[in-house]
Image (cartoon, rainbow, N blue to C red):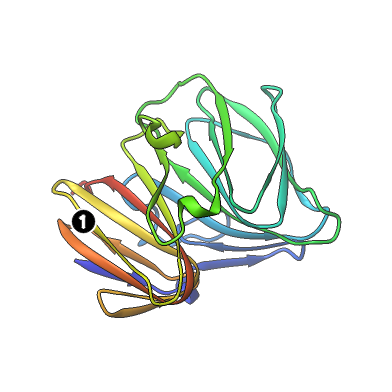
């Protein structure tokens, strides 16, 4: 079964310095029909004004992935990590038993544009940890690139859950397929662009939930950046 959720159906909060769209219930946005999908708990599309950001705040028992689309974000945390991640970079935090961190736009003028993703970990109480890396553009150009996985293969970030996160930048006219295996499901998010999935048109911010064994094909109508989460099957 293929279920489409359009961009405009997401939750939305504009705080001036932060313009955020919520794919799942988050903060003041509550939708009992969209609490999570499998172990995927949060996808927030955030646009952060220059020089602004989130001050030190806590998390625990969550796998948190930041996927940068544009601009740059300065990270600091209670483990002593400090870094600036930029477009093309990806970051992973295991909050585990508890972590505090801040995220601030490293530019005083340019907007930062990112996806913040939360995954429910396979177990609670893990030691907190941090990792980031830059993904060369050619690694995801017109092909699937493994961004995060439980075994860190293909130089992907390691996450503590049975999830594979794939990404691609698909140039206009190019196509990719993906086969969802038995006892799995998938969630596809269009970060930017326009494409068709099995003939259905999807645009920036649209998402598709795929809850049965099946094959899909995406074809870009214009350059498109896509994230695909291969997830444990839905629990009934």
Q: Quadrant of residue 147?
A: top left
Q: Residue furthest front?
A: 138
The answer, for residue 68, to whether it is visible in the render is yes
> Where is residue 78 drawn, in percent x and y?
69, 25
> Where is residue 221 drawn, in percent x and y?
42, 80
The answer, for residue 120, to whether it is visible in the render is no
Q: Quadrant of residue 190?
A: bottom left
Relative height, residue 42 to residue 60 (above, below) = below
Please give the name of the residue rendered at 50% of the width and 26% of the height, measured from the top-left corner. 96
> Where is residue 180 drawn, in percent x and y?
21, 54
Please give the name of the residue rendered at 35% of the width and 43% of the height, measured from the top-left corner. 164
Position of 74 with respect to 140 (left or right) is right
Count of numbered circles in the view: 1
Residue placed most toward the observer, 180 or 153: 153
Residue placed most toward the observer, 87 or 14: 87
Residue placed most toward the observer, 28 or 78: 78
Please give the name of the residue rendered at 26% of the width and 68% of the height, measured from the top-left corner. 217
Residue placed most toward the observer, 9 or 116: 116
Work out which quarter of the rendered image holds the N terminus and state it.
Answer: bottom left
Position of 172 with respect to 69 (left or right) is left
Relative height, residue 115 to residue 170 (above, below) = above
> Where is residue 120 drawn, in percent x and y?
40, 38
Q: Quadrant of residue 156?
A: top left
Relative height, residue 35 to residue 4 (above, below) = above
Give the SS element for disc 1: strand
Relative height, residue 219 to residue 228 (above, below) = below
The crowding category of the residue bearing disc 1, from other C-alpha atoms within 10 Å (few below 14, some 14 to 19, many at least 20), is few
Position of 19 with respect to 210 (left or right) is right
Q: Which residue is mark 1?
A: 179
């Amino acid at each position: 079964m293929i279920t489409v959720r359009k961009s405009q159906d997401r939750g939305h909060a504009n705080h001036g310095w932060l313009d955020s769209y919520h794919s799942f219930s988050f903060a003041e946005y509550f939708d009992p029909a969209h609490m999570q999908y499998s172990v995927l708990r949060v996808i927030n599309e955030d646009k952060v004004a220059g020089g602004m950001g989130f001050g030190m705040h806590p998390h625990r028992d969550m796998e948190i992935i930041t996927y940068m689309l544009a601009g740059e974000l300065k990270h600091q945390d209670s483990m002593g990590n400090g870094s600036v991640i930029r477009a093309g970079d990806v970051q992973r935090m295991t909050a585990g038993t508890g972590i505090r961190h801040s995220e601030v736009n490293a530019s005083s003028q340019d907007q930062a544009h990112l996806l913040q993703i939360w995954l429910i970990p396979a177990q609670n109480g893990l030691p907190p940890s941090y990792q980031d890396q830059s993904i060369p553009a050619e690694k995801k150009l017109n092909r699937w690139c493994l961004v995060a996985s439980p075994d860190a293969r293909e130089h992907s970030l390691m996450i503590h859950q049975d999830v594979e996160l794939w990404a691609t930048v698909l140039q206009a006219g190019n196509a990719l397929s993906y086969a969802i295996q038995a006892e799995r499901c998938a969630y596809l998010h269009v970060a930017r662009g326009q494409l068709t999935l099995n003939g259905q048109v999807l645009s920036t911010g649209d998402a598709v939930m795929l809850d049965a064994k099946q094959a899909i094909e995406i074809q870009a109508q214009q350059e498109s950046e896509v994230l695909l989460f291969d997830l444990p099957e839905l629990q009934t």
